[in-house]
Amino acid sequence: MLWPVLLMAAALMAPSAVLAAPAAGAPTAEEEQLFKAWMQQFGRRYSPGEYPRRLRIFVDNKRLIDEHNAGNHSYQMGLNQFSDMTNEEFQKMYLWREPQNCSATKGSFVRSSGPRPDSIDWRKKGNFVTPVKNQGPCGSCWTFSTTGCLESAIAIATGKLLSLAEQQLVDCAQAFNNHGCSGGLPSQAFEYILYNKGLMGEDSYPYQAKNGTCKFRPEKAIAFVKDVINITQYDEDGMVEAVGKHNPVSFAFEVTSNFMHYRKGVYSNPRCEHTPDKVNHAVLAVGYGEENGTPYWIVKNSWGRLWGMEGYFLIERGKNMCGLAACASYPVPQV
Ligand SMILES: *[C@@H]1O[C@H](CO)[C@@H](O)[C@H](O)[C@H]1NC(C)=O
Ligand SMILES: *[C@@H]1O[C@H](CO)[C@@H](O)[C@H](O)[C@H]1NC(C)=O
Ligand SMILES: *[C@@H]1O[C@H](CO)[C@@H](O)[C@H](O)[C@H]1NC(C)=O
Ligand SMILES: *[C@@H]1O[C@H](CO)[C@@H](O)[C@H](O)[C@H]1NC(C)=O
């Protein structure tokens, strides 16, 4: 009667031994198969010299994802278009490299009394949010946060949903402390649109994902800003009021290495920074809600529809998670 117990013990140990073995080891045949399928899905090709390196990075990422998903977390990770990149490569290509001075210590947002919804999702209230866009390899997230916010604000005010030109902001908004593919801030981009007197549409000023010269033509401007509202630094409750009672709100936060693999669920990170000098990515809050007692934001990203939850993510609300309440703003459209 001893050996069945031993067998059981062996059976219990085997899976963990099998799981642990490849963690440091070379890619397995199965992993390489998965890599090839992934390459096909994302249209990747490598030179024979590059292939082993990308396979190695992919396998490291895949193992990290599996390990995370086996744990008890409020969000899951998954493969996406970034799965063959190291975190350093990702940071360099998609995020800001230097602080963007987003310090509205005293904002212009005026809080009001009266009820606000427990939850809201502007995607479901009407035709108020354009499809998720893709910034490509250019640190222009701030332009997408800006256009997304103005697009929604105009749609809520007029019922007309326009698609606006990120490239105009990349090419033309430098005088307002913005730096094209090297970063910028929605609040400063709204100021640019206000003083520049207009923003053109996506079709008349198409996106290029690289720095260019300014080709703004005033007669083609279709969107205008009357006022810029900054929400006071760290007033996350003010953000809730703005989104619940007015329209989506642009904000920035600190993207750390685990975020590039986000797939679904409520993102939360006990180890990110919370101050305005550390935020490195701008996005758009299009709603908020609560799940199993955890309040969250619904956020539109600019990494295409294949990333996250069809281009969106949820992030924990009420804790200034990763500095998300450090620099939030929205425009009042001129309509
Ligand atoms: C998972 O994490 C949650 C929140 O941290 C905790 O309440 C729960 O007990 C954990 N479950 C397990 C199985 O560890
Ligand atoms: C931040 O502000 C300082 C002082 O105004 C300026 O020199 C610096 O270029 C700004 N940084 C960015 C990234 O805009
Ligand atoms: C909003 O904040 C930005 C800095 O992020 C600043 O340049 C701008 O002047 C502020 N606007 C208002 C109306 O307070
Ligand atoms: C893009 O242009 C800005 C100036 O408008 C410059 O500061 C920045 O370094 C450029 N970035 C890239 C990636 O060329």
Image (spheres, rainbow, N blue to C red):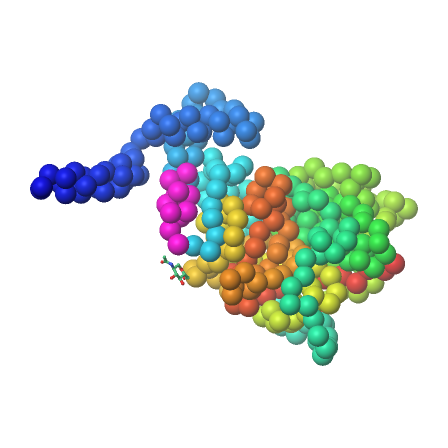
- Furthest residue in direction top, as rendered: 48
- Identity of the residue furthest to the left in this view: 2
Residue 260 visible to the viewer: no
On the picture, is 68 further left or further right than 45? left
Judge whether residue 63 is colored magenta: yes
Asked whether, in this view, residue 267 is left or right of residue 68, the answer is: right
Q: Can residue 96 be seen in this view?
A: yes
How far from the left and from the top, in percent, is residue 230? Answer: 69, 67
Q: Residue at x 43, y 60 (%)?
A: 271
Q: In which quarter of the image is residue 192?
A: bottom right
Tell me if residue 146 comes above or below residue 67 in the rendering: below
Please identify the quadrant where the N terminus is shown.
Answer: top left
Q: Nearer the viewer, residue 325 or 123?
A: 123
Q: Is residue 220 left or right of 79 when viewed as pictured?
A: right
Overall secondary structure of the magenta section? helix
Against 25, is 174 above or below? below
Give x and y (percent) for residue 79.
49, 39
Rendered residue at 55%/57% (across/down) = 315
For this orientation, the residue located farthest to the right is: 219
Q: Give the range drawn in magenta.
A: 62-72
Q: Which residue lies furthest to the bottom in this view?
A: 113
The residue lying toward the viewer, choosing from 321 and 131, is 131
Q: In which quarter of the image is ligand 1?
A: bottom left
Residue drawn 77% across the image and 47% down it: 164
Q: Is residue 206 above or below residue 286?
A: above
